[in-house]
Structure formats: structure tokens, C-alpha cells
Image (cartoon, rainbow, N blue to C red):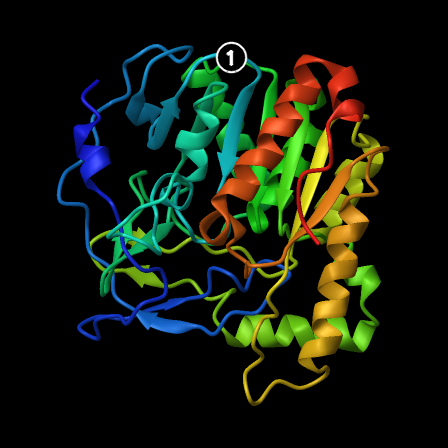
């Protein structure tokens, strides 16, 4: 398959100024255990429909649409080798966050997906209703739209159907950012025989609900909802933006993880180092208090299995895979090495963080 179109679709500055010709209330980071100011952003339809993915799922670069039974999901794959790494994006963000340098378009760095492709097979995909910034606009995701809202269970079942339809070989190392980390854990609980390693990149956790005092959790939920996380927003020329109620699947995760606890496996957990700014009208906690709770939630995820690795991305905000892609690449590299040779997981030097 010709992937030159994908290579040309490089995107500059994430979070830059946005056109006001049309509006999308974007709350990509709010669905994680983080706070990001919601912005008015425009969207535009794809200039061309991605071709159907037809290359081998085990080797070679592929980029295109995969039919999962009545609708199509955009899938991209690079590299060779095993285990297969699958990259799951955060709330409302497309797979471009793993492939394209959104911060340095003039001198793009090596991003996570091409970096991982140097040592194993790696895939990412676009969930319906996701997007990425391009200049003053927002570029739609490349999968068929569906009606929103949806549930985390539906997201996991969709990913499973995609990997099966595309014959992507398992077992998998799942690397998930933000709400993608939540989906990764739910996938591991739902299909435990298919997951052999995890990388959680500033991941949302249902355990945040018990880490925070009830009144502070409620305040955090209200603040996220006020930013638009639970609101179904139409994307002009596309369909609905991805929408899952904030914390709405916490009980689903608790039940799934209780029924199928995470098996011992290589697990790396990364936490952001740069605090999130709170809006002026935030109530219920200070920024310092919130950061303490968010750090505790990430540290708690590192206790899911013995000998998990935890480090802080000291130069990163929530989007660690954009701010410090080399750190995420190294975390995935170490988990892949640990899967290939379990003794390596215990022998490797601790690479990163504070």
C-alpha cells in the first residue's frame, strides 16, 4: 500500500489558535484524570477517504480502512517482530498523536509509533469521533462515524473486532494514553489471554474515585463535565465527536478487574510532571491538591502487578507521548524486552524519570 499520503499529513502545533468559522468544544484531556481548558475548535472533513488496508498484518507498512461488520475503522501498522504493540489514544484524540509531531512541524522529532517500529510490530487506529489539530483547524479521524455517546465496553469490543478482522497477530502489548489506558486495562480484563504487557501513559483510573475524598471527586467530575466531556457535539462534515460520560464506566472496570485481575506481566506506568492549570472558577481543591491526587492515582496503577515500573515525565504535561516521545518509546521498549525475555524485566536498568 502507498503510504506517502500518510507521510505528507504531518501536523503542527497541538493546542494552537483555532479558526472560529465553526466550533467544536474539545475536551480531549478532560476525560482522563486531568484538567485541560476546553477550547473552541473547528473541524473539517477528510480531503480523501483512506484506502482499504490490504497489506499483510504481520509485516510491511499498512494504512487504511478495515471492515468490522458494516462499518470501517482506520488502522495503521509498521515494523516487524513480536510481540505486537497496539497504541490506544486518549479521549477524542486520533492515532495521529502517536505518529505525527504536533509540536514541532518544522523539525519533526521521532514520534512513538515510528520509534517502536524499529524494534517490533506496532499498530494504532482511530476510534470514531476522534481528531487531531492541524494548524488552525482540526483534522477528523479516519474511521466511519457512529452515534454517540458510547461505553468503554463498546470501545473494547470494537478494538477486539478490529484486531480480529485485520488478523493482527497477538498476544499484544497495549500502550494506552489517558482514557486509552483505561481501555487497555479493560481489554486485558475482558480478553486476558490476548494481553502480555501494558504501558499506561498518564492513564485515567476508576480507582481515582476512591483515592479522592467523595466531595473532591464530585467536584472534579463537575469540572470535567463543565468542560464538555459528557456533551455529544456534532462535527461538521463528519458526525458525532467521541463521547463517554466522565467516570461513567468506573463500576464496569471494577467488576471486570475483580472477575479477571491483571496477571503478572511487564507493566510500565508514566505520570506527567508539569501541573495542569485549573480554571479560575474551579472549586473544591487547589492545583497542588489535585496534582497530589493524580500522582497517587498513577502510583496506584503501578501497584497492579509486582515489579511494575513507574516514572515521572518531568518535562511533560498530560500528552507525554507528544512532549517526551523518547520516554514513551523507551518504556515500550523495556516492556517488549521483558515479554521476550522475562529475566530482562528484572535486569534492565531503570531508565527514566525523577
Q: Quadrant location of residue 157?
A: top right
The crowd level at tag 1 (other Cα within 10 Å; few <14, some 14-19, many 20+) is some
The answer to whether residue 154 is visible is: no
Quadrant where the image shows the C terminus:
bottom right
Q: Quadrant location of residue 117?
A: top left
The answer to whether residue 70 is visible is: yes
**What is the number of callouts on the image?**
1
Residue 254: x and y in percent read: 78, 45
Q: Is residue 23 left or right of residue 204?
A: left
Residue at the image point whose x is 50% and y is 73% from the top: 227
Q: Which residue is denoted by mark 1 in the rendering?
A: 169
Quadrant where the image shows the N terminus:
top left
Front residue of this view, candidates 311 and 67: 311
Residue placed furthest toward the left: 47
Residue 126: x and y in percent read: 39, 39
Residue at the image point whose x is 35% and y is 56% from the top: 103
Residue 144: x and y in percent read: 31, 39
Q: Is residue 260 above or below residue 300?
A: above
Residue 345: x and y in percent read: 75, 24
Front residue of this view, candidates 85 and 349: 349
Q: Is residue 251 above or below residue 64?
A: below
Q: Is residue 233 above or below residue 2?
A: below
As helix, strand or loop, the secondary structure at mark 1 comes to loop
Q: Is residue 33 left or right of residue 63?
A: right
Amino acid at each position: 500500500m502507498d503510504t506517502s499520503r500518510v507521510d505528507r499529513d504531518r501536523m503542527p502545533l497541538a493546542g494552537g489558535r483555532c479558526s472560529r468559522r465553526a466550533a467544536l468544544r474539545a475536551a480531549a484531556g478532560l476525560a482522563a484524570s486531568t484538567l485541560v481548558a476546553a477550547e473552541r475548535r473547528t473541524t473539517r472533513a477528510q480531503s480523501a477517504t483512506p484506502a482499504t488496508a490490504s497489506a499483510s498484518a504481520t509485516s510491511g507498512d499498512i494504512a487504511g480502512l478495515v471492515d468490522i461488520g458494516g462499518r470501517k475503522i482506520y488502522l495503521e501498522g509498521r515494523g516487524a517482530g513480536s510481540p505486537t504493540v497496539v497504541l490506544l489514544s486518549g479521549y477524542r484524540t486520533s492515532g495521529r498523536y502517536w505518529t505525527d509531531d504536533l509540536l514541532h512541524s518544522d523539525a519533526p522529532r521521532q514520534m512513538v509509533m515510528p520509534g517502536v517500529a524499529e524494534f517490533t510490530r506496532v499498530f494504532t487506529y482511530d476510534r470514531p469521533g476522534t481528531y487531531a489539530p492541524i494548524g488552525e483547524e482540526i483534522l477528523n479521524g479516519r474511521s466511519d462515524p457512529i452515534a454517540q455517546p458510547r461505553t468503554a465496553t463498546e470501545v473494547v469490543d470494537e478494538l477486539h473486532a478490529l484486531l480480529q478482522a485485520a488478523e493482527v497477530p497477538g498476544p499484544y502489548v497495549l500502550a494506552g494514553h489517558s482514557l486509552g489506558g483505561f481501555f487497555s486495562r479493560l481489554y486485558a480484563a475482558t480478553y486476558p489471554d490476548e494481553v502480555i504487557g501494558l504501558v499506561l501513559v498518564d492513564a485515567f483510573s476508576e480507582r481515582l474515585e476512591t483515592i479522592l475524598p467523595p466531595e473532591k471527586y464530585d467536584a472534579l467530575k463537575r469540572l470535567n463535565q463543565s468542560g464538555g466531556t459528557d456533551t455529544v457535539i456534532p462535527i461538521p462534515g463528519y458526525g458525532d465527536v467521541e463521547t463517554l460520560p466522565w467516570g461513567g464506566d468506573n463500576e464496569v472496570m471494577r467488576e471486570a478487574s475483580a472477575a479477571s485481575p491483571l496477571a503478572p506481566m511487564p507493566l510500565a506506568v508514566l505520570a506527567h510532571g508539569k501541573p495542569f492549570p485549573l480554571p479560575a472558577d474551579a472549586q473544591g481543591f487547589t492545583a497542588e491538591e489535585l496534582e497530589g491526587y493524580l500522582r497517587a492515582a498513577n502510583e496506584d496503577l503501578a501497584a497492579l502487578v509486582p515489579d511494575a515500573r513507574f516514572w515521572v515525565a518531568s518535562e511533560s504535561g498530560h500528552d507525554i507521548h507528544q512532549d517526551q516521545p523518547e520516554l514513551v518509546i523507551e518504556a515500550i521498549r523495556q516492556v517488549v524486552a521483558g515479554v521476550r525475555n522475562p529475566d530482562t524485566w528484572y535486569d534492565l536498568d531503570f531508565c527514566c524519570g525523577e
